Amino acid sequence: MSTLTDYAPIPASALGPALNEQGYYVGRVERNLYWVTDAVYQCAFLTTPDGVVLLDAPPTIGNNIQRAIDEIAAANGVSNKVEYLIYSHHHADHVGAASLFDKNATRIGHEETRRLLLRDDDPARPPNEETFGDRRTLEIGGERIDLSWHGPNHSPDNIVIHLPDHDTLMLIDIVNPGWVPIFQSNLSEDIPGYLEAPANALAYSWKHFIGGHNGRLGTRDDITVHQQYMTDLVESSRKAIDSVDGTPYYQQYGANSWAAIKAILEETARRTAEPVTEKWTGVLAAADVFTEDVAFQVMQSVRLDLGYGSWVHP
Amino acid sequence: MTEAFPEFAPIPRSALGPAVNEQGYYVGRVERNLYWVTDGTYQSAFLTTSDGVVLLDAPPTLGNNIRRAVDEIASTNGVSNEINYLIYSHHHADHAGASSLFDKNVTRIGHEETRRLLIRDDDPARPPNEETFQDRRTLEIGGERIDLAWHGANHSPDNIIIHLPDHDTLMLIDVVNPGWVPVYVSNLTEDIPGYLEAPANALAYSWKHFIGGHVGRLGTRDDVKLHQQYMADISESGRKAIDAVDPRLYYAHYGENKWAAAKGHLDETTRLAAEPVIEKYTGVLAGADIFTESTAFWVMESIRLDLGYGSQVHP
């Protein structure tokens, strides 16, 4: 283990409820909708007369998912059997405990999730048999769940799960309430789609937000704060792209083009991040840990997708 | 600039291409009437035909030098210098951002996803291609054959293979940089499983000359195989590193700062994954000491998130 860096303290507003001895917390979101967390990952479930509908199955929560369900089902005298599992997207860190549940459970997700799970061929993540393209409304045990796909963002298959009768929206790996995105904008593939996703979420009617990370639920204000953080990065990246002159780097490195590019882009990412890190440290947790990483990915998308700062040889 | 320039290993001679001229470009023949242009970092290509010139990509760093290179060849060979067709490899501005330098009546051709992304990006420098295709399309322009094929997402969702069977040439941008390692996060790639698979798709075609879009020279089949080996080494080393690093140490140290723990854990995993690969390829592939760690990070994340490797299920 290399030397561990010291970081700014975590704002109390970023933290959620304490975990029990087994390492999880389960709580009610609204009526028969519950959420479970291990303080880093989150999933949720609905108890219905047709059994339990599980929304994601992160492996770090793993067998604690069934414990959480058992706890609620016993307290409320309802079925504890997971009959339906909805995948938010294909990544192993959010659905890698899927195989813990009955193989006869109905697995539902986007058609691209199915394609990617077939590609990934991971026994821990059985591909969803039930799919949809743009929108699908489920009625399970009298409860309504609206699934929709607004295009690629974090991953090509990431969907919005809206529970209109529970005032809740679930959208994973976009906004981490109270926290900045991790590495490379939450390890996002499509940055323009990632930047647009919060507005898509806010277009729905809801009060409670399930973001998949970290230890607490979110509010509409959390989404707005995240939007502002990302907007600040986009704006700062444009200024940084304008302000860095590549010439001295190319002169210094000569034939080593990759050395020059690394130096130019790292300086651009550093300048992009600097004012944003300063503004958000103490507001969003880990702004000092990951802003430079997020800034890099945003700045690259501003260059490559939007074509900003593109210099055309005269 | 706030820091001194770090020093890196010398560039192997084998990575370098021809010298650029005073205007900052080199143009050379690939085969028959197919030519390539480079500024030492970016590359495009063009075909001179009886129906005018077919341009393959228009990187802005080459910019107006594309026109100069076409004029130089056309006047030497006594053929038309009029660019009537422009084929986009993918939508990114760094390979297509000089598109608007050419007549707006030029026929622009590319994948249907390239069109969708260019409409989204709304950049006047990159007019969306009107001509599209989905999986495959064969063009016959001025008697020359160009096969376009899409094998799925890799570097970007819309990146295509351009095969010129009668010129023994394959063009596939931003996957293999002959003589060099990929730049940042596997050439700034969106879909890593697709990126890892792409070289095999390229090798399945018959060709001798490879146009990769970077850096200063053309490639060979051996360059594509060497890149495959480099990426396979990173994948293998990534798995070992995932197995070797215990995340609990980091989560215990950082307590409620989960993101500090995640960063400590994954940065250490990346460092371990990259270390033997940097040692093996420094002096073989240019820039191995510069970008292997960044590429290793992205590959390691794909191994974790796409393949589910090393996933620990809470008991």
Image (tube, grey):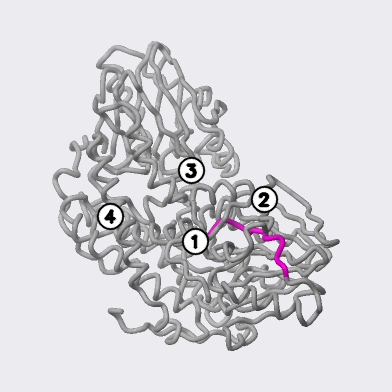
Please give the chain letter of the residue carrying mark 3: A
Residue B84 drawn in magenta: yes
Q: Which residue is mark 4?
A: A232
- Comparing labels 4 and 2, the label whose residue is closer to the camera: 4
Q: Nearer the viewer, residue A13 or A60?
A: A13
Which amino acid, by three-letter code, is at mark 1?
A: Leu
Which amino acid, by three-letter code, is at mark 2?
A: His
**Dot 4 crowding, Cα within 10 Å, few <14, some 14–19, many 20+:** some
Task: Give the mark count.
Answer: 4
Q: Secondary structure at mark 4?
A: helix
Task: Name the quadrant containing residue B79.
Answer: bottom right
Task: Name the quadrant containing residue B245.
Answer: bottom left
Q: Which residue is mark 3?
A: A152
Q: Secondary structure at mark 3?
A: loop
Q: Residue furthest right?
A: B143
Q: Secondary structure at mark 1?
A: helix
Please give the chain letter of the residue carrying mark 4: A
Whole-Å distance between the Cαs marked 4 and 1?
22 Å
Pointer 3 and pointer 1: residues touching (CB < 8 Å)? no
Whole-Å distance between the Cαs marked 3 and 2?
18 Å
Which amino acid, by three-letter code, is at mark 3?
A: Pro
Residues behind callouts 4 and 2 on a single chain = no
- Badge 4 or badge 3: first in the primary sequence: 3
Please give the chain letter of the residue carrying mark 2: B
Whole-Å distance between the Cαs marked 3 and 1?
17 Å
